């Protein structure tokens, strides 16, 4: 069975940073090679666009996000009722610690029982049952 992963914003923005971490490059190569089935929630793509736009401008953000979507066989996830309820519960329980986008992606990861790939450092303390892979940069 193929490994499955849900990507957080930090993975995408670090991939397009000046010096992407080798661990993220290796992870993304595994996705590209079809070894890992990767999911990204649509608001995460919007957030990544925003961060790249803020640092590198609109044209670069458009190019980088378009390249990302074309280069990697990512499955874009839209919301359904189960995801909405799970994300809402997470936001209600952890309103200070977790952003809405964190709640969406974590809810999807928990519902599908897949690993959440992120650059966030404190999630293991907040949600010890979450399958988590954290990247440093």
Image (cartoon, rainbow, N blue to C red):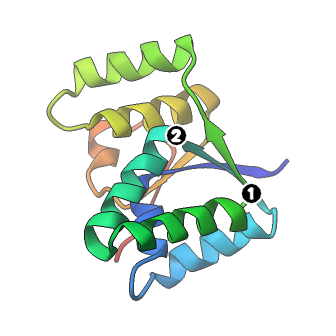
Q: Quadrant of residue 14?
A: bottom left
Q: Residue at x 62, y 50 (%)?
A: 5
Q: Quadrant of residue 71?
A: bottom right
Who comes first in sequence, dot 2 or dot 1?
A: 2
Q: Position of residue 42 (x, y in %)?
A: 52, 40
Q: Position of residue 124 (x, y in %)?
A: 34, 47
Q: Is residue 73 above or below residue 27?
A: above
| Drawn side of residue 38 relative to residue 132, left or right | right
Q: Is residue 97 above or below residue 79?
A: below
| Closer to us: 106 or 68 | 68
Residue 16: image tag: none
Query: Is the residue marked by circle 1 packed among few (<14), some (14-19), or many (20+) residues within 10 Å?
Result: some
Q: Secondary structure at mark 1?
A: loop
| Drawn side of residue 1 relative to residue 104, left or right | right
Query: Is the residue marked by circle 2 packed among few (<14), some (14-19), or many (20+) residues within 10 Å?
Result: some
Q: Which residue is mark 2?
A: 42
Q: Is residue 134 above or below residue 16?
A: above
Q: Residue at x 49, y 74 (%)?
A: 15
Q: Which residue is mark 1?
A: 73
Q: Secondary structure at mark 2?
A: helix
Q: Position of residue 70 (x, y in %)?
A: 70, 63
Name, please, the residue furthest toward the bottom. Answer: 19
**Quadrant position of the C terminus in the picture:** bottom left
């Amino acid at each position: 069975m193929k490994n499955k992963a849900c990507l957080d914003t930090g993975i995408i923005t670090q991939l397009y940073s000046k010096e992407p971490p080798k661990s993220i490059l290796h992870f993304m190569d595994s996705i590209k090679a079809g070894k890992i089935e990767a999911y990204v929630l649509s608001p995460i793509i919007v957030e990544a666009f925003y961060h790249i736009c803020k640092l590198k401008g609109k044209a670069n953000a458009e190019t980088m996000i378009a390249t990302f979507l074309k280069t990697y066989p990512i499955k874009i996830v839209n919301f359904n009722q189960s995801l909405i309820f799970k994300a809402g519960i997470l936001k209600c329980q952890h309103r200070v610690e977790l952003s809405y986008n964190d709640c969406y992606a974590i809810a999807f990861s928990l519902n599908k029982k897949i690993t959440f790939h992120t650059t966030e450092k404190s999630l293991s303390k907040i949600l010890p049952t979450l399958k988590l892979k954290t990247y440093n940069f």
